[in-house]
Image (cartoon, rainbow, N blue to C red):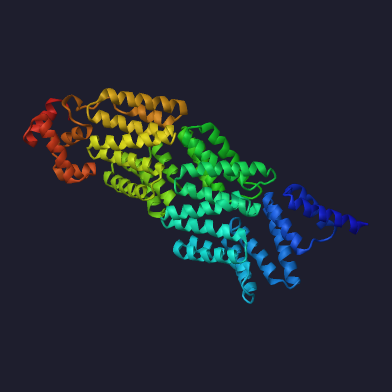
Amino acid sequence: MKSSSRTRTLERGRELLRQQAWSHAYSHLVAADRESPLDPEDLLDLATISRLLGKEETAGELLTRAHQGFLAQGEPQRAARCALWLGFLALFNTGPAQAGGWFSRAGRLLERQESCVEHGYLLLASGYRLISERDTEAAYKVFGQAVAIGERFVDRDLVALGLQAQGRALIRQGEIARGVSLLDEAMVAVTTGEVSPFMAGNIYCAVIDSCQETFDLGRAQEWTAALDQWCTSQPDIVPYRSHCMLQRAEIMQLRGAWSDALKEAQTACEKLAQPTPKPTLAGAYYRVAELHRLRGEFAQAEEAYRHAGHAQPGYARLRLAQGQVDVAISAIRRMAEEVYELGNRAKVLDAYVEIALESNDIADARASADELTKIAKKHGASLLQAMAARANGAVLLAEGDPRKALTALRHSWITWCKLEAPYEAARTRVWIAQACREQGDCDSADMELSSAREVFEQLGAVCELARLNSLPGKNPGADTGLTARETEVLRLVASGSTNRGIALKLKISEKTVARHLSNIFNKLDLNSRSAATAYAYEHDLV
């Protein structure tokens, strides 16, 4: 009687599994396992359900039992498959050491086996290792071999995983168009239901991460919405919801919905921390930290950055906002030396320009702006182009060319507006105001600042409002037509500085100093440094 009851429970659990009723299937299979241990195949299914329900520790225990069961039955290929899943589970949770051990065991079990689909999954593990070593070309080839095996054995999961891995490898080589094409192909398999639910969730998250790497805001929104809809259709599934929340939080932040973004990011932190911290938890804390920083909540930002556990551009910007310019420039310089992945590098360079200009290091600001411009030209994303144009405009302004600066800044502002990014557009308008003022157009400058202030007040951007309040209302040289930089050069001339001395002081080239002097002499109708010195004293510019 007991055996008959267990059989009905087991069969019902299997039926619920086919219906993708994950929680009910889990309950029935666990009940059957309590009465009498499940066979390895059922344990493997129960482990997959456990992962979908967010029970990763339980999944590890079940996979281990299934692995041992297959070994006892003399089925090395199935045992190797369990070892591979244990390796991937460890790779994304406990760390590379345990993962390497399981991958090694899988490889040993497959050594004497004829070609099988498990060899393809083992190739995926090798490709991920090569990615971690930054050998993306070799990784791309290995992932391609995995795809070929998947196609040979008609394993759609393996094909889709291999394609998205190839796409990400290409993106990290800078071949964005080819990489995105492969990602889209992988997503076709997901959206048509060709791959298993567990693999579908993983591919969704990987593709969204790639959109973030390439600053492809449109695709990120499209696939985040699709993931959200998919999660809604699978109410029992747990692991991917927090990833969806995190991506939504970033988009909300860009669009100016800071309060909603903060709630999403905080909820993602809570979910990613339970039952054991996930690798993406650091990213969730970083998003929380960024939102607190933007709102001027420095203590909360500091705490969240600490939980994030790794320095990113926002940390350097926090120190800048706190007036610790030397700390900020040291931090961003170190990041620039260490960060090479496309998405993060562009963010580092954007912050580097701002911080370098604040510390009057125009040479470093120019180098960062130029590199950011090259990245934007190569990859073409609108968000990158907006960042690069603003960086170039800000540096041109510091170099004493407000006319060209204004052109670049206007282009940046228009692009931010198209992206519906009010905070970034308002920050750009502050630079536009300074470029207008440098050219003596104080009315336009005041209008730009007024518009920027209105946006900052609506958003609660405390730091930017404080910065606006600290801006000078009028250029001391405006009455004579001199720009702020030209006035600064004139003061240094009056103090006895040589062109070389001025260049060192302002961290610009001697050629730029000579151009400023030429402009000063022309505007003031002067013909010598002594006449310029006298003028400076007569007009109280010293």
Q: Position of residue 361 (x, y in %)?
A: 28, 44
Please, is residue 1 above or below residue 148 in the view?
Answer: above
Please, is residue 351 above or below residue 494 in the view?
Answer: below
Q: State which quadrant residue 417 falls in.
A: top left
Work out which quarter of the rendered image holds the C terminus and state it. Answer: top left
Q: Nearer the viewer, residue 538 or 250?
A: 250
Q: Position of residue 412 (x, y in %)?
A: 35, 37
**Which residue is drawn at the image coordinates 29% and 25% (left, top)?**
444
**Which residue is drawn at the image coordinates 75% and 71% (left, top)?**
72
> Position of 250 compared to 231: left or right?
left
Q: Position of residue 477 (x, y in %)?
A: 19, 28
The count of marks equals: 0
Q: Nearer the viewer, residue 156 or 512?
A: 156
Q: State which quadrant residue 438 falls in.
A: top left
Whether residue 256 is visible to the viewer of this picture, yes or no, is: yes
Work out which quarter of the rendered image holds the N terminus and state it. Answer: bottom right
> Position of 242 compared to 18: left or right?
left
Q: State which quadrant residue 524 falls in.
A: top left
Q: Position of residue 362 (x, y in %)?
A: 27, 43
**Which residue is drawn at the image coordinates 45% and 61% (left, top)?**
136
Whether residue 341 is visible to the viewer of this picture, yes or no, is: no
Residue lying furthest left: 527
Residue lying furthest bottom: 112
